[in-house]
Amino acid sequence: CCSKLFGAMDSTLKNGINGLLTDKPLLPRVIEFVKASGAGISQKSKDVEDEPPQPQYSLFSRERFLSLFEEVSPRRVGRGLHNLGNTCFFNSVLQVLMYTGPLQRFLLSKQHTAECKCKRESTVCTLCLLESHALEVFDSNKAPMKPAKLLKHMPQIASRFKAHGRQEDAHEFLIHFLDSCHKSLLKQAAQQPVPRPVQQTTSICQLFGGFLRSQVLCLKCKHPSNTFDPFMDISLEVNNASTLEKALDAFTKSEQLRGANKYQCKKCQQKVDATKTFSIHTAPPVLSFQLKRFDFLHGFRGKLKKKVQFPVSLNIAPY
């Protein structure tokens, strides 16, 4: 029932470092990321378009965020989950999240429920439900459990999945679930509405969220135009890729804008030949890749069952 592959990678952040350092593996195979260094680029020389809008304040402080990556006692093994009727997509996502180290530490610390207003306001909070689930998973009881509390509130978490007993997509559920957790945190913010740049500073967005950069480069005057979009995961075509690196190469390959697709350059004030390139501008500590195993553009309706390899260590600097 899980029609797309979800990979979660956990890495450690520290102040002043140029890269992401690995923590202990959370999954049987964990990718270690090496982040591109910003050395040689002065802050003053950067154009405004070189960075996404900066938040004026943070909903989850940097100090609290970094504390989630501090060394702790060995990771505990929690309880298994019963399948309650075609809920393998649901269970697999929950188990991946439970063993994502910094998220696990955040949930078990009970930080969120100590501050959440949902009980006073009689509203459903997805993050409160997830915290309660985590406490139950890692209690002293080792017998498999039924994730009935979370499943009961599925219509409030994601109305798309309200039909119980139907096979669903794990990746789609993950995105809806994280978005619901994120919105639960935004509702707690003192200032409403929350400014868009500040929305990216919740604990969920800081853990799972990054920025993609779309750059159009004028081939006449060499003026770049950058657009930044937040993401919670990256979808990669694997129809013509046998490895994660090749899929990323295709994702970041420059597209030529010529002929009828010429680009209107703001500096040249005319239509010109240009290139358009996607890249990972800011990588989150937990970076998720979705491998697109269906090809609907060429009349293919089945699932791509080809093997896609990925390394234990991945240098993301080229991407």
Image (tube, rainbow, N blue to C red):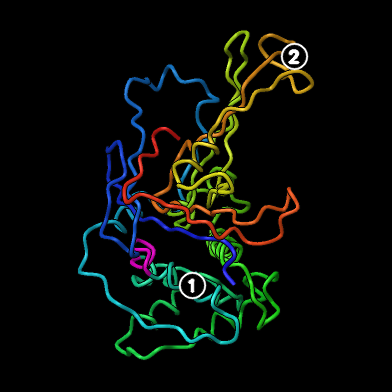
Dot 1, how many residues are within 10 Å of its Cα: few (below 14), some (14-19), or many (20+)?
some
- From the top left corner, tell me how far across and down residue 145 is, in percent: 44, 88
Say if the magenta span includes residue 104: yes
Q: Residue at x 32, y 90 (%)?
A: 141
Quarter of the image containing the C terminus? top left
Tell whether position 314 is magenta.
Answer: no
**Name of the residue lying farthest toward the right:** 260
Residue 118: horizontal and vertical position, in percent? 55, 73
Q: Does residue 218 lie above or below 296 as drawn?
A: above
Q: Position of residue 171 (x, y in %)?
A: 57, 62
Q: Which residue is mark 1?
A: 92
Q: Relative to the observer, which residue lies in front, 29 or 50?
A: 29
Residue identified by numbered label 2? 271
The reply, left or right, for residue 149 in relation to residue 283 is: right
Give me the residue at 69% from left, 77% from top.
162
Pointer 2 local density, CA inside 10 Å: few below 14, some 14–19, many at least 20: some
- The residue sitting at 55% across, 38% down in the picture is 251
Tell me the quarter of the picture where residue 95 sits: bottom left
- Which range is magenta? 99-105
What's the residue at 50%, 30% (across, down)?
51
Who comes first in sequence, dot 2 or dot 1? 1
For residue 113, above or below residue 219: below
Name the magenta segment's main secondary structure. helix
Cα separation between marks 2 and 1: 49 Å
